[in-house]
Image (tube, grey):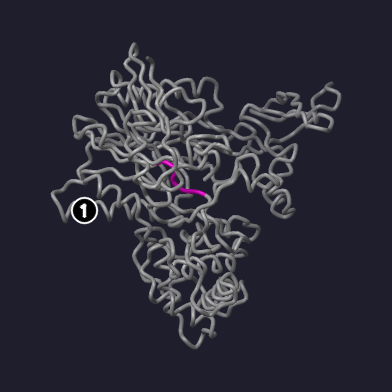
Amino acid sequence: MASPGVWQALSLTAKDSGYNAVGASFAGAPGIVLGRTPALAWGVTTSQNDAQDIFVLEEVALAGAGGRTGYRHNGSVLAFTERQETIRIAGASPVVITTRASVYGPVINENGGLAYFNSDERLYKENGFSKPLALGWSPLQAGAVEGVLPALLGLGNPRQTSSWRHVQALLANYTAPCQSFVTAFATGDIGFTAPCLTPQRAAGQDGRYPTPGNGTADWVQFVPFTDMPRTLNPPEGFVATANNKLVPHEGFSGAYQGNDWGTDGWRAERIVQLINASFSSGDGKLSLAEAAAIQQNVRSAFAERAVRAALAVADAKLDAGARRLRTTLAGWDGEAAIGSQGASAAFGFVRELALLLRGAVPGDKTAFYSPFYLVSRVFGPAGEQGDASPSSFGSDAACATQGASSCEDLLAKAMSNAESTLRRLHGGSDDGFPAWGDRQGGSRLHQCVFAHQLLAGSLLSCLAGQRASGSGSIHTVSKGQMRYDEDETMPFVHGPTYRALVDLGRPPSESRIAVGPGQSGNAFSPRYGSNIKLLVDFLYEPMAPGTAEDFAPWRTAQGLADPLAWVISPP
């Protein structure tokens, strides 16, 4: 979530080339990145493939180089490629730094890089961070990204995308960043493709930890496009993706794909559940209204599982505050909806539990930022069977490291802490809890923060930044990712700022789009935040070419700000 927004709604046609698409794009992209043509509709989510490694270099002095150093690689000593960077600062002298690069890529722990880890001296030394660390990232390979722009531009040209075969020919040239493309054709075909320039690593290496940078663990090759995950017309009759794991943890084609999808499997699983429910209750098809309802779903199966563990704690373990929280948790419906006190109680409990678990992994400063630690190691990944009782929560020995005699005691402590925090945020009142994300109602919890990308933290942030009510959580289909750090208000900092509903069997004017927070990057423009209401209230506008005047009646009826002109077409 940011101001200005990443996406702008756009309709673009070019008669000579045949380009004809409508959807969303971002500054600098000469085409539609997400959207539809008369023949194709497509969407994109990050696939989160592990396409980078950290290589630990062995630094040695270069003979006769006046104190300069190089590094060992395949039995030779190579010189770093050095470059002078001048950073000009208003009202002060320029700062000149020297950056270095290796055969793998740039050295990243110099000039203040990796200060986050360097601040923990023990972690720094144990992981070898005192040595030069080079970033190996597949897009840094020579010529690696030359086909990305033509691939994206081609998707908006009906002459190049009339069939699955044509789209595959385009995406074969797409290398980075790693994405999951879902495609639907006017012919009725549907498909999924996850292109990415994915490294095949040396035997014994999977990329999870810093790797020797002496040539013994270099990448072997890149996985061929034809071996990347894809499907055409799957038997289920649908494709669903939400930044979730696409392949087993061990990867495929000898290529490790990553290990950090724990928080997002819940979202994909919920989408599948909702689609199957719609299929079984109707004619086996998904209407635009049903698709919209899925996009808007804010039920958190993860939080429900956490709540079940809390409700199973013995009453004798609970103090008065924990019992008060339990009463609210017991009546919660699992919806992270704006105004829900149950959602505030549930995620307040999850946050406090995450903070208690913060030291479970020595030196791990990310365990409390995201509840990934909880999902993957405490309550299990999405789809895993089993109860959520205190006995299944974890080992008492592990919980004892956090000052609790048992895991049940740890859960009780998290409940008590959550009640205390929420009561304080509610002005010390014992009359309920703050309402989840309800900025209009005065709640400070889970406000949606559109921070200005440059001015956040400055005196001008109050003018350039924007706030709104916010629903959802990190695990809901409509994502409302919050920070689980020392900010006890759990601000909503990451979520969808583009939604689309397309039926290629119906007139283009019946497709719908929501892009926010606004069309303008000028903080003083009425269009700077004109679409926040679209995002917060789950509203849509026609996804079709038109002028500002064409959209004025529709937007006025929806209570939106002045109409936008978002069409670029040649005369």
Locate residue 149, reporting x and y percent: 45, 23
Q: Which residue is the extreme one toward the top?
A: 16
Is 122 left, or right, of 548 in this rendering?
A: right
Q: Is residue 308 above or below residue 18?
A: below
Q: Which residue is the extreme one toward the bottom?
A: 316
User: Which image quadrant for residue 161?
Assistant: top left
Q: Which residue is mark 1?
A: 278
Q: Is residue 547 above or below residue 383?
A: above
Identity of the residue drawn at 61% across and 39% down? 54
How many dots with numbers?
Answer: 1
Helix or strand or loop: what does disc 1 sit on?
A: helix
- Could you tell me which quadrant the C terminus lies in? top left
Identity of the residue drawn at 33% across and 54% down? 269
Is 85 left, or right, of 17 in this rendering?
A: right
Label 1 amino acid?
Ser
Along the line of sight, the residue nearer the viewer: 482 or 521 = 521
Along the line of sight, the residue nearer the viewer: 64 or 343 = 343
Locate residue 513, reporting x and y percent: 35, 39
Locate residue 24, reporting x and y percent: 41, 33
Q: Which residues are magenta?
A: 494-498
